[in-house]
Amino acid sequence: MEDIAAASSQGDKVCYSDSNVILSSDIHFIYEKQVRIAPNLCIFMFCEKGVLPITLNGKKDVLQYDKVALCWPGSVLYADYPSPDFKGACLCISTHFMQAIIHRSKGMWERFLYLKEHPVLQIQPENGERFVPYEKLVAGLLKNPNRVYYKEVMTCAISGMLYELFSDLPESISHKMEQNTLRQGDILFRKFTKLLTDETIKSRHVSCYADKLCVTPKYLSAVCTKVSGRTASEWINDTVIDRIRYQLAHTDKSIKEISEYLEFPNMSFFCKYVRKALGCSPKAYRDKLR
């Protein structure tokens, strides 16, 4: 995320940036370059006018007004030089952010798999109008970055735009994908992500999830890497950190109680784990939110 922000910041083109989201009004920094998308990053590229020839995972296409290109972790992107009138933007989100969206809604995982195989999405003209309220909301928010809950509202607005984008896939495509196209690895990975949402399972070890899925830890991690570009350990760690954030922000449990609830062996280990992941102690993180 830091590299993307630094590259796109030339000319003050970054509209918004935090640890999970970067919204840039320009994508000139990828022209005539071949880049591999980092394993913790997803990039959505939009076009307002003109055209941009791209090659995504070996497949040539053209980014134009009615298309959105979705670059998933591990994707290889080459962007040629655009037409003189080209104007585009990109939304970079962390896989943690994407993971939260996938887990929240029924049928989202099938849509994710479909778009992983078909990363350039055609937007129907009548559906494009649905994005206008979100665009206006984001534009208004950008004018007042010092408002209370600015980041939270911006995150909700961007999440809404992504849900609208995913909803352009009809249910029939999602159902067909689930019934006919899912490979064994996709099915295993989906079962794994469902286990991650089970609040009764608090283990931080790949072996625990592998045992429940009747596979070896090595095989589970290999499948996760192939399907999502991230290891099983990375997905587990993201889930644990998400639960820690929630407990610190939205409950009155003491730090010790949270440590015990999430089944850490002791307070010292819990505090070290949080400090490494969040850059501060559990108490300091909680104090920043209150």
Image (spheres, rainbow, N blue to C red):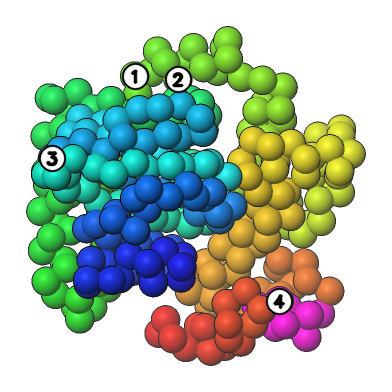
Q: What residue did someone put label 4 on?
A: 273
Q: Secondary structure at mark 3?
A: strand
Query: Percent from the top left, x then y, of residue 216?
Result: 89, 39
Can residue 219 be seen by looking at this rendering?
A: yes
Q: What residue did someone put label 3 on?
A: 49
Can residue 103 be seen by looking at this rendering?
A: no
Q: What residue did someone put label 1 on?
A: 170
Question: Marks 2 and 1: CB-CB under 8 Å?
Answer: yes
Range covered by the magenta-colored residues: 266-274
Rounded to the nearest angstrom, the CA distance separating label 3 from label 4 is 46 Å
Rounded to the nearest angstrom, the CA distance separating label 2 from label 1 is 7 Å
Looking at the rendered structure, the kind of residue marked 3 is Lys
Q: Residue at x 34, y 19 (%)?
A: 170
| As drawn, 134 above or below 83 | below
Query: Percent from the top left, x then y, of residue 64?
Result: 22, 33
Instruction: Mark 3 vs mark 4: give the one in front.
Output: 3
State whether the magenta stretch is mostly helix, strand or loop.
Answer: helix
User: Mark 2 or mark 3, which has the lower sequence index?
Assistant: 3
| As drawn, 182 above or below 129 | above
Looking at the rendered structure, the kind of residue marked 2 is Ser
| As drawn, 30 above or below 118 | below
Rounded to the nearest angstrom, the CA distance separating label 4 from label 2 is 38 Å
Quarter of image, res 54: top left
How many neighbours does mark 1 have within 10 angstroms: few (below 14), some (14-19), or many (20 or more)? few
Q: What residue did someone put label 2 on?
A: 174
Residue sitting nearer the eye, 278 or 86: 86
Q: Secondary structure at mark 1?
A: loop
